[in-house]
Image (tube, coloured by chain):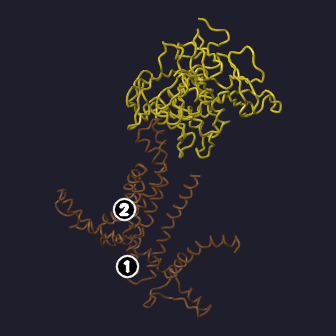
């Protein structure tokens, strides 16, 4: 094999991977979203029949329509689900930033021999199944759970707080689950920060707090942006956390999608929900990509 | 007042010789310990206004700690540091009228050149108009007006160095600290920048304290040099005195090249001693003013360029020794001859190459005479 085709193969592999595992499934979903629900296996129509030839193909195309998308716009449930998901994802991201920044900052300031251990501790939760960790929160948050028992023991509250099955529990679950994705990019941005810059700021008249806002914070911006996207993007489509920790009035698009797909067996509508969700996510993903490129350029 | 005719009065800047002068900076018995390590060991030092003062020494000698204490990043464990008569030990860095140019320059990467220079002024809440005037002035001082809108990563090393200088000068500090300011520049640029630094210091009439491990740099820029070793001041003097009259072997050896000849003082006369240094060799005459007595161990320190190399035995010289050329280091303008003496010691002598190399007088293994005057070297006592 010559050099050129070797290089082609090397570039080809990720494209092949993307094509097979993302593009092809996406087009299947897109196709289903344009179909109609049917009591059949699979539960939609039309299905693609190669044996019917060209005529069969045009007939197949003519039966596809945007009915499901129109339905999505007309039914409040879907718009509310999307909006509620956006809202929950946005505030969870903000909370994760508020919790994650001090953690990352403390890690970056810790003696260098401690840092690998601290990093390890941040990554450690990944060794346990995500599902189990979310389940564990039920045990903590439920009325007779650890948190309520603890607070009542301290005499802070007289009767259990209703946390489980509320939006609060969903926020707690998302912030907890995605915190490492916030901390790691923040840590890597803060760790690179040259201590001399802070001394220079102090030398030029800043108190430590002013130096933080004028130097540390702006220079950690790439980490903040990366962390926020890494939390925001998966949080929008989150299903497990609102399902296990949220209540019946917690609506998130992941839950809605699940209900349409499994409870209603409305694959076409569920597919349309998924396609719209993907389109919604493309905007932040593209923004994220561009920011990463810019950050890399600035480092050169 | 009696001024010697060949010296301009303005050239005599020596406030350290004038007891009436008050120092700008005074270290009073300052000791600094980090845990069990003593970085600064009971140092007292005065620095005067308008001085360009150099702290010189190998890495780990404590010079950077001295500077960081002036900037306020470290507090002395014992002793006092005063600036303009005021004890500054408890004043935090952001309130001191002292600015520092950092070794790594520490330019804010997210700000333009302009914003970097304006940073301290904004912090001090200068009016907008004055800030932009001052920034303009600083930019033209360091010849970077064209680069005002650039970010630090778009500048060359030399340009960054100038931005760092402009930023540290912008607030008109009483004292400017320069931490190895030219360390990252190449040799040519460094030499050029040294003169620019001196010009700027003279033009602004400010007090500069520079930390460096480069003795040539210290010699070039400084009005006085403090040679440090192991947390102590070894000698504090003008560059000429440091070079010509080092007070100990460490200083003699640290600054430039030197030949050290160990021996014992055989006789002392008025302002003259004789040093006996090897069996069968004549004593060396050394002009010496301070008191010393015969029998003491002592050492002659003499710079290679003060030693002549001749083929014929020189007449009318104070000191002469025979030797064999062991090695020659040719560095273009100069040649250093490594001459092996009768007792096996290697003695360095330097001659400038006024003639082309092809016509060189001596070559390897030639018998030569080394000679020097009795005022050429200094006697170092134990």
Helix, strand or loop status at disc 1: helix
**Name of the residue lying farthest toward the top:** B1
Horizontal side, residue A263 vs residue A273: left or right: left
Callout 1: few (<14), some (14-19), or many (20+) C-alpha neighbours within 10 Å?
some
Residue B243 visible in this rendered orientation of the protein: yes
In the picture shown, does residue A259 fall above or below B315? below
Residue B10's place in the image compared with A75, above or below, is: above
- Res A2 quadrant in image: bottom right
Q: Which mark is residue A259?
A: 1
| Chain colored brown | A
Residue A125, how many percent across, how many down?
A: 37, 65
Query: Residue sitting at 49 percent across and 50 percent down?
Result: A192
Question: To which quarter of the image does residue B35 belong?
Answer: top left
Depth order, front residue of A80/B137: B137
Kindly identify the residue that appears in the image at 60 percent across and 42 percent down.
B149
- The single residue placed furthest to the right in the displayed view is B359
Q: What colour do you see for chain B? A: yellow
Residue position for label 2: A175
Sequence order check, earlier mark of 2 and 1: 2
Q: Which of B38 and B291 is in front in this view?
A: B291
């Amino acid at each position: 094999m010559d050099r050129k085709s070797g290089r082609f193969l090397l570039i080809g592999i990720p494209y092949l991977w993307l094509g097979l595992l993302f593009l092809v499934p996406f087009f299947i979903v897109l196709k289903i979203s344009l179909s109609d629900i049917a009591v059949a296996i699979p539960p939609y129509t039309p299905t693609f029949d190669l044996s019917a030839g060209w005529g069969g193909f045009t007939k197949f195309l003519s039966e596809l329509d945007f009915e499901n998308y129109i339905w999505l716009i007309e039914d409040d449930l879907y718009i509310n689900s999307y909006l509620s998901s956006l809202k929950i994802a946005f505030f969870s991201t903000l909370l994760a930033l508020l919790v994650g920044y001090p953690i990352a900052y403390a890690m970056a300031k810790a003696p260098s021999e401690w840092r690998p251990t601290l990093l390890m501790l941040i990554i450690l939760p990944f060794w346990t199944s995500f599902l189990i960790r979310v389940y564990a929160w039920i045990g903590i948050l439920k009325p007779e759970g650890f948190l309520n028992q603890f607070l009542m023991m301290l005499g802070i509250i007289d009767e259990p707080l209703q946390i489980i099955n509320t939006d609060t529990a969903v926020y707690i679950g998302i912030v907890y689950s995605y915190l490492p994705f916030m901390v790691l990019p923040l840590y890597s941005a803060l760790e690179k920060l040259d201590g001399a810059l802070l001394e220079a700021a102090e030398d030029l008249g800043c108190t430590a707090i002013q130096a933080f806002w004028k130097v540390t914070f702006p220079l950690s911006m790439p980490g903040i942006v990366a962390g926020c996207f890494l939390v925001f993007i998966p949080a929008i489509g989150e299903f497990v956390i609102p399902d296990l920790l949220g209540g019946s009035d917690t609506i998130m698009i992941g839950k809605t999608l699940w209900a349409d797909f499994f409870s209603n067996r409305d694959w076409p509508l569920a597919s349309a929900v998924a396609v719209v969700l993907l389109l919604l996510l493309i905007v932040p993903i593209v923004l994220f990509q561009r920011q990463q490129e810019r950050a890399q350029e600035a480092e050169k | 007042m009696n001024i010697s005719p060949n010296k301009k009065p303005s050239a005599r800047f020596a406030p350290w010789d004038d007891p009436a002068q008050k120092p700008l900076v005074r270290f009073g018995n300052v000791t600094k310990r980090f845990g069990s390590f003593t970085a600064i060991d009971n140092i007292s030092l005065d620095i005067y206004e308008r001085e360009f003062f150099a702290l010189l020494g190998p890495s780990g000698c404590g010079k950077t700690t001295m500077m960081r204490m002036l900037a306020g990043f470290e507090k002395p464990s014992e002793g006092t540091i005063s600036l303009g008569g005021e004890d500054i030990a408890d004043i935090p860095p952001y309130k001191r009228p002292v600015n520092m140019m950092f070794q790594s320059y520490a330019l804010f990467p997210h700000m333009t050149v302009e914003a970097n220079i304006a940073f301290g002024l904004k912090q001090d809440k200068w009016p907008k108009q004055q800030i932009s005037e001052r920034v303009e002035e600083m930019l033209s001082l360091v010849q970077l007006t064209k680069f005002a809108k650039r970010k630090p990563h778009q500048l060359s090393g030399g340009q960054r160095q100038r931005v760092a200088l402009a930023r540290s000068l912008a607030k008109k500090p009483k004292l400017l600290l320069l931490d190895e300011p030219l360390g990252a520049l190449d040799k040519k640029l460094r030499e050029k920048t040294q003169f620019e630094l001196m010009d700027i210091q003279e033009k602004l009439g400010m007090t500069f304290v520079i930390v460096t491990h480069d003795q040539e740099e210290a010699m070039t820029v400084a009005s006085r040099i403090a040679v440090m070793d192991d947390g102590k001041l070894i000698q504090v003097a003008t560059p000429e005195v440091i070079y010509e009259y080092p007070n100990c072997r460490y200083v003699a050896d640290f600054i430039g090249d030197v030949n050290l000849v160990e021996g014992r003082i055989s006789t002392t006369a008025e302002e003259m001693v004789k040093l006996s240094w090897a069996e069968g060799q004549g004593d060396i005459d050394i002009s010496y003013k301070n008191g010393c007595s015969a029998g003491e161990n002592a050492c002659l320190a003499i710079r290679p360029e003060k030693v002549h190399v001749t083929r014929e035995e020189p007449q009318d010289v104070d000191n002469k020794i025979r030797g064999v050329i062991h090695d020659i280091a040719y560095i273009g303008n100069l040649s250093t001859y490594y001459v092996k003496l009768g007792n096996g010691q290697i003695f360095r002598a330097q001659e400038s190459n006024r003639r082309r190399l092809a016509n060189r007088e001596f070559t390897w293994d030639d018998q030569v005479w080394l000679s020097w005057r009795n005022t050429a070297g200094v006697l170092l006592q134990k």
